[in-house]
Amino acid sequence: MATALVPGSFDPIHVGHLKIIESTAQIFDQVVVAVVGNPQKSASGLFDLAEREALVEASVRHLDNVKTTHWSALLTDLAREIGADVMVKGLRGLTDFEYEVQMAQTNEHVSGIVTMFLPTAPEHGYLASRFIREIARMGGNVADMVPPPVAARLQEHFRS
């Protein structure tokens, strides 16, 4: 039984992330989506790890072979703990590729875990959580960029 780990900060999860998770769920027997703490992004973050995990969980409920967790230590330790065969990362373009390849090579050197890359669907290539946070913060409509539970939570968050 092959297990894939799909890590990300998911602050918030958007439809591009969801498409990558859905594709991964079609390829692997089990998928664990890990909401990870990223110290480089935490200053600009919107939701804490537990709330991000709850939003991811609500967004992937339709996928029977997908579980969620959150993690703030070495990702390779989580991969080992859950018995992941591979890590899966989505790529929007060359900038993502350069960063992600270096991280993948480091992870493989440290733990032996291999990373598989999936390209983002062309219609989602522009999406970035930081843009979604800013649009929502300024009162813009992000309903077509995020799963329904996330759209509702963003609206609630910025209304208060």
Image (cartoon, grey):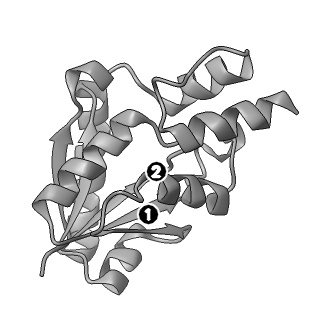
Do residues under tags 1 and 2 come within 8 Å of each other at their CB atoms? Answer: no
| Residue 120 placement: quadrant | top left
* Residue 45, percent from left and from top: 67, 41
Rendered view: 141 above or below 121: above
Residue 117 higher or lower than 60, as above or below: above
Q: Nearer the viewer, mark 1 or mark 2?
A: 2
Q: What residue type is labelled 2?
A: Ser
- Disc 2 is placed on an element classified as helix
Task: Identify the secondary structure beneath mark 1.
Answer: strand
For the C terminus, the image quarter is top right
Lower position in the chain sequence, tag 1 or tag 2: 1
The amino acid type of the residue labelled 1 equals Ala
Which residue does the numbered mark 1 point to in the structure image?
A: 34
Residue at 72% in and 16% down: 139
Quadrant in the picture for the N terminus:
bottom left
Report whether 4 appears left or right of 131: left
Query: Residue 101 versus residue 89: which sits nearer the camera?
Result: 89
Q: Nearer the viewer, residue 124 or 7?
A: 124
Q: Residue 59 carries which label?
A: 2
Q: Where 24 sits versus 43, above or below? A: below
Q: Position of residue 93 (x, y in %)?
A: 24, 26
Residue at the (19%, 49%) spot, across then down: 23
